[in-house]
């Protein structure tokens, strides 16, 4: 994951803006994720959140292993 040492925006949503990567419509307005740039990390944050949610869902599908105690 590259980036500049100068920082940038971690997560940025623009309200009622028409141009960008994609838009999501909510009752209080339309939110737009802007175009990808070195200073805007919104798409990277959304990708990481998606992966974490997927891992959480798959972890819930695993069966629990019963506890085993070994006594010498």
Image (cartoon, rainbow, N blue to C red):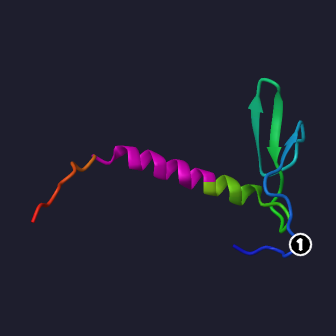
Magenta residues span: 49-63
Residue with the mark numbered 1:
6
Let me know if residue 72 is in the magenta part: no
In the foreground, 8 or 66: 66
Q: Position of residue 54 (x, y in %)?
A: 50, 50
Let me know if residue 56 is in the magenta part: yes
Q: Is residue 12 above or below residue 5?
A: above
At mark 1, the secondary structure is loop
10 Å crowding of disc 1: few (<14), some (14-19), many (20+): few
Q: Is residue 63 above or below residue 37?
A: above
Q: Residue at x 79, y 73 (%)?
A: 3
In this view, the residue farthest toward the front is 72
Q: Position of residue 29 (x, y in %)?
A: 83, 29
Determine whether, in the image, residue 16 is placed left or right of residue 11.
right
Picture mark count: 1
Q: Indicate the quadrant where residue 10 lies.
A: bottom right
Q: Residue at x 88, y 42 (%)?
A: 18
In the foreground, 25 or 38: 38
Q: Position of residue 48 (x, y in %)?
A: 62, 57
The quarter of the picture where the C terminus appears is bottom left
Q: Residue at x 24, y 50 (%)?
A: 65
The quarter of the picture where the N terminus appears is bottom right
In this view, the residue farthest toward the top is 27
Q: Position of residue 15 (x, y in %)?
A: 88, 38
- Prevalent SS, magenta region: helix
Q: Residue at x 28, y 47 (%)?
A: 64
Q: Indicate the quadrant where residue 36 lies.
A: bottom right
Determine whether, in the image, residue 13 is placed left or right of residue 66.
right
């Amino acid at each position: 994951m590259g980036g500049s040492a100068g920082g940038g925006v971690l997560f940025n949503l623009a309200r009622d803006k028409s141009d960008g990567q994609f838009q999501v419509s909510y009752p209080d307005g339309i939110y737009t994720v802007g175009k990808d740039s070195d200073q805007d990390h919104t798409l990277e944050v959304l990708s990481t959140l998606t992966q974490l949610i997927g891992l959480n869902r798959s972890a819930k599908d695993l069966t629990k292993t019963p506890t085993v105690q070994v006594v010498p």
